[in-house]
Amino acid sequence: MAQIEIRLPKMGESVTEATITNWLKNVGDTVNMDEPLVEVATDKVDNELPSEAEGVLIQQLFAKDQVAQVGDVIAIISTDGGSAAPVLEAVKPAETVESEIAGAISTTLEHVNGSSNGVEKTGPTGKFYSPLVRSIASKEGITMAELESLGGSGQSGRVTKKDILAYIDGGRETTARVQGIEPAIASTAGVITPALAPAAEAGFLSQIKPMSVTPNPGDEIIEMDRMRKLIADHMVMSVHVSPHVTSYVEADMTEIVEWRNRVKKGFAAREGENITFTPIIMEAVVKAIKDFPMVNVSVSGNTIIKRKDINIGMATALPSGNLIVPVIKQADRLNLIGLTKSVNELANNARNNKLKPEDIQGGTYTITNVGTFGNVMGTPIINQPQVAILALGAIRKVPAVIETPEGDFIGIRHKMYLSHSYDHRVVDGALGGQFVRRVADYLEQFDGSREI
């Protein structure tokens, strides 16, 4: 009987694993070539994986909500319509192998010494701890009270090797103090950096004891979906990592508004799509980044990584109410038409859940448009590991003083606030303020006779 192994494909440069969120075919179902077989979710985006063969699905090697590594066999398809085969054991991840080895060693030591390395297999709440986790805890002097306080990313909330190492490396002393627990030994970890922040599966929020809130009668309880949990983790991590400062500038958008009103019909007829304010503002941001390249950086420990490429992320609201940030790669190499087409394509794909993992990776600077919701300004949170983000306010008609050689007068102008939040570890007020002022200058110097 011919059998085809369906493996979890590589879904982006930094994506190493995915969660099985839903099987679209059951064991025994007929599957056509390229027909959606399973839904998976990474920490970047959700995807449907098509079948790489035609036949009958005879085996699912991962259950719903289990995590598979890239390259793991997740399903078996019989190409000659045979019945379900005996269950094949999936390739075990390295952590499982390590855990089993440590368990064998631990069991041997217990028989010889009558010892459990000072940590019981289960805690007061009945939570199980693997031999590997117990061994690490014993070596690092981690008490049972600390173990019980950790949020586990394993099955049924079990604490894994990755969880306990993230706890140790990610600022154990600070975390323990927040939770009201005195560590058995002092941690050498200091400021939590993006490189040391816990992985998405553990979640940064899991390292902080959440406030317990009791609902009142009649309150509605809404469970966060997976994307909202990821957003929450990312936002909390960002404000802990970066000291945020925000500078504000008001830009006169009158020339741009009048120019767009003049060209938008012809542009739509010629190009088949609309030109919005976003690519025009993005063009000004790219020019300002070239003038002030130190806002296009990332921080890794005590080093600064100065980015060669200018990859602009644009925060996009989804119909579900969640937020995603598709990225325009090498935006400095695109003219206004290219920026317009890229902005429209990514925005449409985001709204229709058609983004690819690589579409939301590699951003070096982010723009978010709070004006879409009628807001005049905002204080955006930095999209780590970037160091700055620009919020665009609503464009409004306002009375303004207009200076001319013949004298000043009051007129109606189109104005917009720019709110620039930046990481004060590496971007000081002078740089952060000068950058956003330069963006406004480029917008106000826009050539109203420009052809497109």
Image: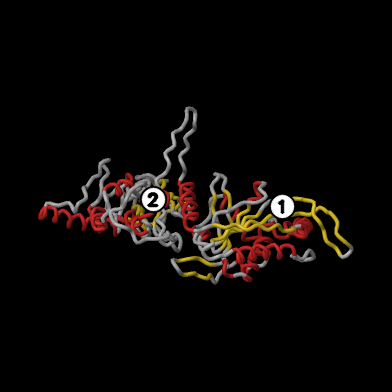
Picture residue at 27% right of the left edge, 44% below the top: 127
Q: Position of 375 compared to 42: left or right?
A: right
Query: How far across and down, in percent of the image, does residue 222 sit?
Result: 48, 37
Q: Quadrant of the C terminus?
A: bottom right
**Quadrant showing the N terminus:** bottom left
Instruction: Locate residue 261: give its quadrant.
Output: bottom right
Q: Residue furthest top?
A: 217
Look at the image and tell me whether residue 58 can be seen: no
Residue type marked 1 = Ile
C-alpha span from label 2 to label 1: 41 Å
Residue positioned 22% across, 47% down in the render: 121
Q: Is residue 176 left or right of residue 118?
A: right
Viewer can see residue 407: yes
Return the disc, 2 or 1, that comes first in the chain's sequence. 2
- Residue 276 in the image: state x and y as whole percent: 69, 56
Q: Are marks 2 and 1 in contact (CB under 8 Å)?
A: no
Residue 395: image tag: 1
The mark total stands at: 2
Examine the image and state in which quarter residue 415 appears: bottom right
Please indicate whether residue 211 sits to the left or right of residue 317 in the image: left
**Are there few (<14), some (14-19), or many (20+) residues within 10 Å of tag 1?**
many
The three-letter amino acid code for the residue at tag 2 is Gln
Mark 1 element type:
loop
Disc 2 marks which residue?
207
